[in-house]
Image: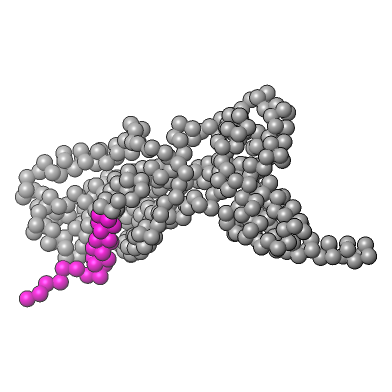
Amino acid sequence: MYQVIFNTHDVVLLMTAYQCILFAILLLTIKREKPLSNVFLAFFLLQQAAIPLDILISFGAEFRHVALGWSPNLFYVFGFGYWLEAPFLLWYTRSLIYKDYRLTKKDLIFLIPFFSYLVYQILFYYRLAWHDKLHLQEAYNLFSAPHYMNYVTLFREVFRAALGVMCILEIKRYSQHIKTNFSDIDRIDLTWLKILAIGFLGIRVWAVLVGVLILLSVSFGVTTNFEIMGLLGNYTTFIMVSMLIFFGLGHSSVFEGIEAKHTDSAKADVPKDKIKDAQIKQVVDYMKQEKPYLAPALTLDKLAAQLKMQPRILSHLINRHFSCNFFEFINSYRVEESKRLLTDPACAEKNMLDIMYDVGFNSKATFNTLFKKKVGMTPTEYRKQSMAQSNITQVTGL
């Protein structure tokens, strides 16, 4: 009377698809900041939902027969998600990183594999008569299928992994950018994006390994356990999607986007004759007299405007003459100012948080880390040592 359609592995695939679709709907219906980013992430999730459905239809123990009873046209439809999820994740990453990001012709290059695969399926499968498609699927066997499709599958997984690496490189580039342009990076939270990019890159690399094992087993007769590895990949994806939703629902993106046309400005070399001793002296004198570093939200552009200097010239001057980036340069002055306050008797009643805010820091962790890195001890230890030395001096003087 009852027929079992799903086993445990199939349920995991269905739950993965369900979670992705639900989260995508939430992203598209709940009004949040960066609407374009939400659209990219939602479509990425929809493609992620398509992948387990394709696996379920193609390899599900019982559901394959159910799908055949519904329509042979169901086969390969959801497989297009493989070719689309990686571009959408890359575009999502870029939409967070770059200000006013819009798709360009260069971005659409990543859709070439998708359209190529679409044309192939239309020509060699969907144009077939209904009964021919039905017969083809009923007789389908991974070992009897055209071997060149195993190479297509491997290329697909390598393509997805390559775009995952591109996401990591974009994040790394952005991390370098914020340290070159911002003195306070604690409010710029990259945790969400790193979890997303690194997690799915790991899944894609695993899929490449599965693709290699399938190729070795089917095309070269090497015995491998690609089925077990495939199942482990499915469970890992389910866990990753669950984590994605958990972090995503409580996450608020805080990004200072890069102007796309200026992304390479920091790499552009500035002729040495453009940096003069007078400019170096101007910067040193201004930092000493005006103390702009006391402003927590100081940026490279703001300091350059105060100095009436091009940001590119100022950045190059800091990198070459002071041998550090903007973040390190500004915070070195903050550490020195905090040292002065910690030894100032007039500030003896101030606690560490007061001093931290007075010198321009917004994070106690950052304050302690940078202070210890530069001084060799924590601010508290430095104050105690200074007080002890002061007491010794007073006693000796008596």
Q: Main secondary structure of the magenta part?
A: helix
- Residue 345 in the image, given as x and y percentages of width and height: 77, 59
Q: Going 42% across and 39% down the picture, which residue do you hit?
A: 99
Let me know if residue 84 appears in the view: yes
The reply to whether the magenta stretch includes residue 12 is yes
Work out whether residue 155 or residue 107 is closer to the camera in this orientation and state it. Answer: 107
Dividing the picture into quadrants, the one containing residue 11 is bottom left
Dividing the picture into quadrants, the one containing residue 96 is top left
- Residue 286 in the image, given as x and y percentages of width and height: 69, 36
Q: Give the farthest residue toward the bottom.
A: 1
Work out whether residue 249 or residue 339 is closer to the camera in this orientation and state it. Answer: 339
The reply to whether the magenta stretch includes residue 139 is no
Work out whether residue 89 or residue 68 is closer to the camera in this orientation and state it. Answer: 89
Quadrant containing the N terminus is: bottom left
Task: Using the image, determine if residue 55 lies above or below residue 130.
Answer: below
Q: Going 16% across and 40% down the picture, which residue do you hit?
A: 122
Q: Going 67% across and 40% down the picture, which residue do you hit?
A: 290
Q: Which residues are magenta?
A: 1-26
Q: Give the farthest residue toward the top.
A: 273
Q: Going 55% across and 36% down the picture, which residue do you hit?
A: 301
